[in-house]
Image (cartoon, grey):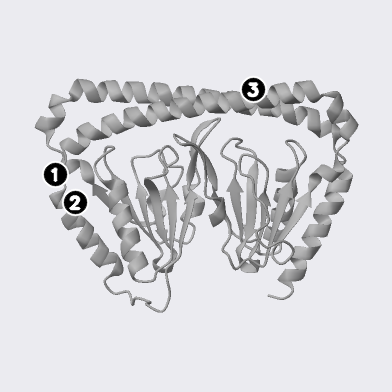
Amino acid sequence: MSGKVREFYPGGNTSYGFYSFYDFIIDKDATRIFIIKGGPGVGKSSFMKSIAKTMLEKGFDVEYHNCSSDNNSIDGIVIPALKVALIDGTAPHIVDPKFPGAVDEIVNLGEFWNEKGLIANKEEILRATQKASRFFKIAYFHLKEAKVIHDEWESYITEAMDFAPINKITRYVANEVFGDVEPDFSRVAKARHLFGSAITPQGPVNNLDSILIDVENVYILNGEPGTGKSTFMEKMLSRAQEMGIDTEVYHCPLDPQKLDFLVIPRLKVAFINGSEPLDADLSTFQRTEIDFDQYLELEILDEYKKEIASCKERFWAAFKRAVHYIGEAKRVHDEVEGYYIPNMDFPAINAKRDEVLEKILSYAEKV
């Protein structure tokens, strides 16, 4: 029987630049963390995917931590039952051992490249790497611009919002979700922070289907920006933490200070921002939809009709420009990979992969 797959993003292209939740890929009590080093195109993603495939076939659940800048690459995998992770430790998400040897182990794929071949293409590699970095900077300027516009958009909505009924609904839902739950005051609750969606070269992408894989009840929060959906989730998060209940907190890829999804595994409950494009079939869940827009004062909204329309137009224009430049960065990054791939000893890398896999399987024998 094959294991289950869940997919997340440990880092993202945001209005703050590249934003990392790498510290939450695996818990501090990990058995082993393999930190994979090496340049672009050396096979880090394929190395991890191959091990993930084998572990899934052996019935282990696997987490894929996807790359926000390349829809076909991963930045890490986790095998929860073994408390084992493999993580891409190269820029922009540099990871170094915290407990060398005891927990962390460096896998250096740079040992398997033809240095002379790379030196022969030094100028091209430097040029393309710098160009990719520049395209990312341009993309982040446009995402920052998009956030400023989004903040303006939110300001009009917030002014027109009557939050008193939302406070009442928040209290009602909190009692519905937590009312019959026994709190656990013997421990401090853990909150795991990740991205459930990302701004990628192909635009916004999310993995909600896999995030909700063990969830039964879903609360779908519908409403314009600024109606209080993220704040609602923050209050549910706070309630869970007070009761000693662990949570999975999924942040907004444009503004990581806000929440997009919240999952409470123990209760099999999730809260999701239903205003985002969602790649998930929610028909199989017990669903409760909450319409935040019904508490908007339409007269006030009407006063800002032109401004709101302008915000929407400007926001999506800036957002699309950002996606374009993330795509350009990916295109140039692929050029860099093109210099590395023919200079790699992939049979030797495969042998190293088998060595790491054998070590992971030895942990499985102890479970």
Element on which disc 2 rests: helix
Residue 347 x, y percent position in the rendering: 88, 45
Question: Which class describes the residues within 10 Å of circle 2: few (<14), some (14-19), or many (20+)?
Answer: some
Q: Residue furthest left?
A: 299
Kindly identify the amino acid type of the residue bearing the numbered disc 1.
Asp
Kindly identify the amino acid type of the residue bearing the numbered disc 3.
Lys
Query: Vertical placement of 117 versus 85: above or below?
Result: above
Left/right placement of residue 170 relative to residue 239 reads: left
Which quarter of the figure is the N terminus placed in? bottom right
Name the residue tied to disc 2.
166
Name the residue tied to disc 1.
162
Residue 26 x, y percent position in the rendering: 58, 60
Name the residue tied to disc 3.
131
Tell me the residue at 46%/26% (across/down): 141
Q: From this viewpoint, is residue 29 visible?
A: yes
Tell me the residue at 16%/47% (across/down): 163
Give the Cα separation between the discs numbered 3 and 1.
48 Å
Query: Vertical placement of 100 versus 113: above or below?
Result: below
Left/right placement of residue 324 relative to residue 317 reads: right
Which quarter of the figure is the C terminus placed in? bottom right
Give the Cα separation between the discs numbered 3 and 2.
47 Å
Give the Cα separation between the discs numbered 1 and 2.
8 Å
Tell me the residue at 49%/51% (across/down): 194
| Circle 1/circle 2 CB separation < 8 Å | yes
Question: Which class describes the residues within 10 Å of circle 1: few (<14), some (14-19), or many (20+)?
Answer: some
